[in-house]
Amino acid sequence: MNERDDRLRKRVNTSFTAADMPLWATGVGSMVCIRSTEDRLVELPFHAALDEGLYIARQGFTALSSDIADDDCGALVTSVDSFLATLTPHR
């Protein structure tokens, strides 16, 4: 399970880096936390996830469990990519 969580953090960080956004995912084991140098940006993934029917805490925190599959992680990455595309139309 921890390998899946590490992959999720890596995929989200790849998206943030590609969009040149000051956001990154941290965490250990099943914990994932989205951080930023600009506090106002941390809530954006929360709203994007809600739009896709997913829930993470408003502060960008989520804990993954064994019930969460790779497809669920993919859906979260897709929601991040979708909101990044709205912020960075030059992509």
Image (cartoon, grey):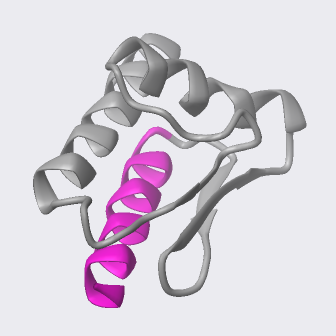
Q: Quarter of the image containing the C terminus?
A: top left
Q: Residue furthest left?
A: 71
Residue 48 vertical placement versus 64 (above, below): above
Which one is in front, 54 or 15? 54
Give me the residue at 36% from left, 88% from top: 2
Residue at 88 percent across and 37 percent down: it is: 39
Q: In x, y percent, where is residue 86?
A: 44, 11
Image coordinates for residue 69, horizontal then vertical, percent: 16, 60
Position of residue 16 relative to residue 9, above or below, is above
* Residue 52 is one of the magenta-drawn residues: no
Give the overall secondary structure of the magenta segment: helix
With 65 as the anchor, is 74 left or right in this view? left
The residue at the point 76 percent across, 41 percent down is 59
Residue 22: percent from the left, percent from the top?
A: 69, 47
- Residue 85 x/y as whole percent: 37, 20
**In the displayed image of the protein, which residue is found farthest to the front?**
67
Q: Residue at x 34, y 29 (%)?
A: 79
Q: Which of 9/49 is in front?
A: 49
Vertical placement of residue 44 versus 26, above or below: above
Residue 35 location, quadrant: bottom right
Total marks shown come to: 0
Image check: 37 left or right of 18? Answer: right
Q: Which residues are magenta?
A: 1-19
Q: Quadrant of the N terminus?
A: bottom left
What is the quadrant of residue 8 in the picture? bottom left
